[in-house]
Amino acid sequence: MHRVAITGTGVFTPEEVISNAELVASYNEYAHRQNALHAEAIAAGEREPMPMSSEEFIVKASGVERRHVVNKFGVLDPGIMHPVLPERADEELSIMAEIAVKAADEAMRKAGITSADIDAVICAASNHERPYPAIAIEIQQALGVKGFAFDMNVACSSATFGIQIATDMIRCGSARAILMVNPEITSGHQEWRDRDCHFIFGDVCTAVVLQRADDAKSASAYEIVSTRCLTEFSNNIRNNNGFLRRTREGHMVDRRDMQFRQEGRKVFKQVVPIVAELMTSHLADAGLRPDAISRLWLHQANKAMNDLIGEKVLGREPSRQEQPNVLQEYANTSSAGSIIAFSQFSDDLPPGSHGVICSFGAGYSAGSVIVRKM
Ligand code: CO8
């Protein structure tokens, strides 16, 4: 068995930014227009008026202040309310592959390797822009990687599950170095017309290089101590879009359940104990006490949720340095969130420091990765 390390990470951040003020102004204009359109039905009591959104609520409930998106114009236009992306020819690089290549270049540079050193590419994300050919294989070709590539999807836990798979493959010798990327264009499956969730998500791409620890050249490599994944079925976060859509009567219309939807309160209450128990038991089984943990890089969905999980795991309130949040800048970027936090806040720890990368989300799914600075 080979020891495995994360030797490089990369983050591609789209240039366009939407502030809470811009988002709320756009949503409220959309809601006003809908209410005017349905004024008669609303007056007759046949239809509820659409409620308005508020910046204060968004910051208080989630901690999100802004989000990056691949197309701001379409999301903010009250007559559109989703990103507008030009169609690309089959011969052109698809947008998910394009942003993955950018994040991958940074991760390989930090690892001190080139694509010639990579044996496999995993594209782990909460949605893929087409079923086949795999986005990962397109990325493999764009980078000139030999070997093999595949896509996988475990929603918000795609990256940690991807790290476990890559770690197991390197341990066993089926690959020596693996590139795992998380192109998350959440704006494409977010419902921007729903006040309860329109503020939650943002777009980004992260990349992680995993190698045999003996091959690590990077000054900021982290050895993988242990990985653990968990799933438990729940309908509380769900998207019913899929390839059988046209086979079902009434499914081709603009139905709400064809985009992201959730029971946010239930998710909050049910997922916090699942994640706290996963991390606590994982650390105990690895022989690590909570006071031996220098940093938690948690999934970035909600600040209050992270504060609560951190407190349960560490047995006290974590400091900002111990548990860095990036959701104020990025919002929830699905599987990429914990990797952005790791990428931005891991260089400073001294060798021998332990930390945990942890994700949680739809499925339910949760992944815990214990690492030690080399
Ligand atoms: N403005 C003003 N008021 C609002 C707004 C708004 N924008 N939204 C809701 N309200 C109102 C509600 O209507 C409600 O009013 P009332 O009390 O009269 O009923 C009140 O405010 C309180 O609403 P909530 O109970 O919903 O508010 P919460 O305090 O629970 O906060 C959150 C809502 C922020 C959603 C919170 O519940 C939360 O963060 N929950 C956890 C969610 C989570 O972690 N989900 C994980 C999803 S991510 C994932 O798994 C990846 C999926 C794949 C990616 C998908 C990409 C699109």
Image: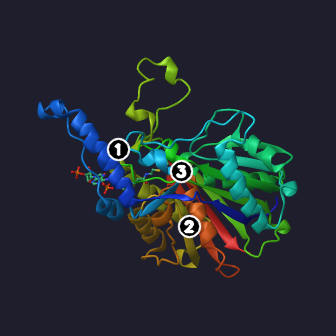
Could you say which quadrant of the image residue 222 lies in?
bottom right
**Going from the N terminus, do you reach mark 3 or mark 2 first?**
3
Left or right for 7, reference 273? right
Q: Amino acid at mark 1?
A: Asp
x, y percent for residue 172:
81, 53
Q: Residue at x 49, y 41 (%)?
A: 189
10 Å crowding of disc 3: few (<14), some (14-19), many (20+): many
Label 2, on which residue? Answer: 297
Instruction: State the residue at coordinates (23%, 39%).
Output: 35
Looking at the rendered structure, the kind of residue marked 2 is: Trp
**Label 1 – label 2 distance at C-alpha:** 29 Å
**What amino acid type is highlighted by mark number 3?**
Cys
Query: Mark 3 near ligand 1 (CB under 8 Å)?
Result: yes
Element under label 1? loop
Read off the residue under disc 1: 194
Q: Earlier in the sequence, mark 1 or mark 2?
A: 1
| Lower position in the chain sequence, tag 3 or tag 1 | 3
171 or 196: nearer the viewer: 196
Q: Residue at x 30, y 60 (%)?
A: 57
Find residue 227 and report its horizontal and vertical position in percent: 65, 58
Reply above or below: 215 against 154: below
* Label 2: few (<14), some (14–19) or many (≥20) C-alpha neighbours in 10 Å: many
Q: Is mark 2 within 8 Å of ligand 1?
A: no
> Residue 226 at x, y = what percent?
67, 62
